[in-house]
Amino acid sequence: MKERIVTYPAIFKPIEDNVYFISFPDVKGAITEGHGLKDAFEMAADAWGTILFDEKKLPKMTDPAEIKIEDPGAFVALVSTDLTKSVASFEKI
């Protein structure tokens, strides 16, 4: 199956010691969390693949420079995921 990699901005907000709350401004209610930055990025990619799995038309990507961050310590990062891997993982279930 051909790769279908998508990249979107995510907001990473520290909520407690080494735990990050992650939201995606391009899909209302799309959230996850991770323990440490490595786990947070992995969870974000996995969640994003799951969220976009059934989408026929992908949402328009917001320009990361236009995202307003109000919480101290929060930051915007691009998250990439391969939707074909998301499909493969769902087919195994």
Image: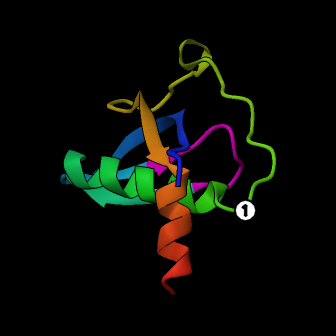
Residue 27 among magenta residues: yes
Q: Residues within 10 Å of mark 1 (few under 14, many from 20)?
A: few
Residue farthest top in this picture: 65
Instruction: Count the numbered circles shown.
Output: 1
Q: In x, y percent, where is residue 3?
A: 50, 45
Residue 17 among magenta residues: no
Q: Quadrant of residue 67?
A: top right
Residue farthest front in this picture: 1
Report whether 57 appears left or right of 46: right
In the picture shown, does residue 12 fall above or below 15? Answer: above
Q: Which structural element holds mark 1? A: loop
The residue pinned by badge 1 equals 54
Q: In x, y percent, where is residue 83?
A: 55, 52
What secondary structure is the stretch in magenta mostly built from? loop
Q: Quadrant of residue 33?
A: bottom left
The amino acid type of the residue labelled 1 equals Asp
Relative to the observer, which residue lies in front, 21 or 88? 88
Relative to the observer, which residue lies in front, 74 or 79? 79
Task: Please provide the residue range marked out in magenta.
Answer: 22-30
Q: In x, y percent, where is residue 36?
A: 20, 52
Report whether 73 appears left or right of 65: left
Relative to the observer, which residue lies in front, 54 or 79? 54
Report whether 7 appears left or right of 28: left
Residue at position x 66%, y 24% from top?
Answer: 62
Residue at position x 57%, y 21% from top?
Answer: 68
Residue at position x 48%, y 83% from top?
Answer: 92
